[in-house]
């Protein structure tokens, strides 16, 4: 347990009272304390009450809720027995951090011919990759006298990226672009430059676990804001309330084909959100790693932050999803002041990004429409195979077929837990990431991410394992088609 002095801010009794439906609590059959404990646990699991948060005292909460102190004390005792709360003498009662905070790379703990690896949402290498590296090698052959160090990135690559932003409606010059070794490297550099210990950062919920890990590593407090793909406008109001209440220094968003939900913020919504966060003085980090994965042909969406000043948003991107995760080329696009701060941090840990990777990226961006079209064809086929297999074999699962991205975000049947399912699946050679890794606290244990970055045959095998584990009537024995590799990192 973290020392109390380093714990997150307290949850007020008034905030809890506003989140609880006391009419439902009082109206249920059974002891009132058990009903209250159930709803308090739901708030923790949903992320409305953060892990490590200090709970209000029994006396104050009882007064605000209009119940006896014995009722609140019994509810707290129930949650302590379940491992949700803990009491620290002289400090108070706190939400216990969930135990599964393993780094991404440790989630994959098996290898071999029978392993079905569905932890990563990472597609295979693009068929355009080999030719790009051959061209890059020929280009490097003419630069024998070059020392190989290019701080900030090769000028031709920065120019190519700037042109793409400009064509999408966000005027950009090459000096607003810095090359990094992938998008995760870019996020690390941005967070290290702009966030300090104790700072609050607004994050959409669910979100990319790597960003949560990075924020925790610098001592930041994540403020989760629920994002419902079916009601994105509600996110703007919720983000505005969170910004007023918590005064975050930064917001981390994936407005295009978010990981894991696949949500896309409509143009009007993203404009209002960008303006809202800018008005509140919040710098938005925009993760565009999946921006090009438009599977349903809706066309490009205006870049987040286009209508507000450059200083309001910092954008990161990469070629890891459209081309290959092994091509370690990403970038930061920002105004000069923010980019200078990020570059200072980055130069202390990375002198340069591999020049042959940068040259290959230049070649790929030269034919990028064809590269993206081929990738989207692959992902569309696999997505449709996954939705069909789940509908057929696991009708109790609910999901929304995303218009793009890399995965389905599924709601499990009532009573099922992702953490339990992941453990049971691992015993059958199917590797999955638990839903809790995509949120804060205990949130999303009732959800499961299934990437559609594998082949349709592998997807059928994975769904067959899941259906058998859940007692699906349509699950039948299949000859397993194993994954070709089990990566070290998880995305």
Image: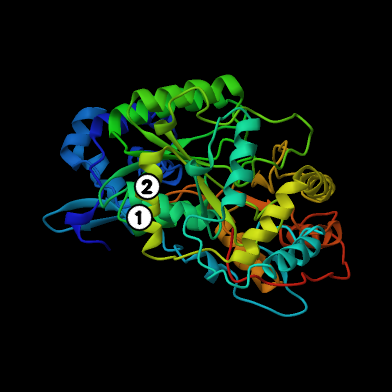
Determine which residue is flagged by label 2.
340
Tell me if 23 is positioned left or right of 291 in this view.
left
Do labels 1 and 2 touch, CB within 8 Å?
yes
State whether residue 75 is above or below residue 236: below
x and y percentages locating residue 84 in the rendered image:
36, 54
Q: Image quarter for residue 463?
A: bottom right
Determine which residue is flagged by label 1.
344
Q: Pick the residue in front: 1 or 300.
A: 300
x and y percentages locating residue 106 in the rendered image:
53, 71
Tell me if 62 is positioned left or right of 231 in this view.
left
x and y percentages locating residue 93 in the rendered image:
23, 51
Residue in view at x 84 percent, y 69 percent: 481
State whether residue 180 is above or below residue 145: above
* Disc 2, SS: helix
Residue 30 in view: no
Quadrant where the N terminus is found in the figure: bottom left
């Amino acid at each position: 347990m973290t020392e109390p002095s380093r714990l997150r801010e307290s949850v007020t009794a008034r905030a809890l009272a506003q989140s609880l439906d006391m009419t439902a609590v009082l109206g249920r059959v059974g002891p009132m304390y058990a009903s209250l404990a159930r709803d308090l646990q739901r708030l923790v699991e949903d992320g409305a009450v953060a892990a490590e948060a200090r709970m209000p005292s029994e006396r104050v909460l009882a007064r605000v809720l209009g119940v006896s102190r014995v009722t609140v004390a019994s509810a707290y005792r129930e949650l302590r027995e379940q491992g949700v709360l803990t009491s620290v003498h002289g400090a108070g009662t706190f939400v216990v951090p969930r135990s599964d905070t393993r780094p991404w790379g440790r989630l994959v703990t098996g290898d071999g011919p029978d392993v079905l690896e569905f932890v990563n949402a990472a597609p295979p290498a693009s068929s355009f990759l080999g030719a790009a590296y051959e061209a890059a090698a020929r280009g490097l052959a003419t630069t024998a006298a070059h020392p190989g160090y290019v701080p900030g990135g090769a000028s031709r690559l920065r120019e190519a990226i700037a042109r793409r932003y400009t064509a999408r409606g966000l005027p950009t010059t090459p000096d607003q672009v810095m090359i990094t070794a992938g998008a995760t490297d870019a996020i690390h550099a941005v967070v290290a430059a702009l966030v300090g210990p104790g700072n609050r950062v607004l994050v959409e919920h669910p979100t990319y676990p790597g960003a949560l890990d990075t924020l925790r590593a610098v001592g930041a407090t994540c403020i989760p804001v629920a994002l419902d793909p079916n009601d994105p406008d509600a996110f703007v109001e919720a983000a505005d309330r969170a910004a007023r209440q918590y005064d975050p220094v930064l917001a981390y968003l994936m407005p295009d084909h978010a990981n894991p939900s696949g949500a896309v913020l409509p143009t009007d919504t993203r404009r209002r959100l960008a303006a809202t966060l800018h008005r509140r003085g919040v710098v938005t980090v925009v993760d565009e790693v999946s921006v090009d994965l438009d599977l349903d042909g809706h066309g490009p969406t205006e870049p987040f932050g286009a209508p507000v000043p450059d200083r309001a948003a910092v954008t990161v991107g990469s070629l890891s999803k459209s081309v290959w995760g092994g091509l370690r080329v990403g970038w930061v696009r920002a105004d000069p002041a923010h980019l200078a701060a990020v570059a200072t941090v980055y130069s202390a840990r990375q002198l340069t990004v591999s020049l042959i990777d940068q040259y290959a990226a230049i070649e790929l961006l030269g034919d990028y429409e064809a590269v993206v079209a081929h990738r989207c064809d692959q992902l569309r086929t696999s997505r449709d195979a996954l939705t069909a297999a789940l509908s057929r074999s696991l009708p109790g699962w609910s999901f929304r077929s995303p218009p793009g991205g890399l995965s389905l975000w599924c709601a499990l049947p009532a009573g099922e837990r992702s953490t339990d399912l992941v453990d049971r699946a691992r015993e059958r050679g199917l590797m999955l990431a638990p839903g809790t890794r995509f949120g804060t606290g205990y949130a999303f244990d009732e959800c499961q991410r299934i990437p559609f970055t594998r082949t349709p045959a592998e997807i059928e095998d994975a769904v067959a394992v899941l259906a058998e584990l859940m007692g699906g009537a349509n699950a039948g024995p299949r000859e397993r088609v194993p994954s070709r590799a089990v990566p070290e990192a998880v995305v």
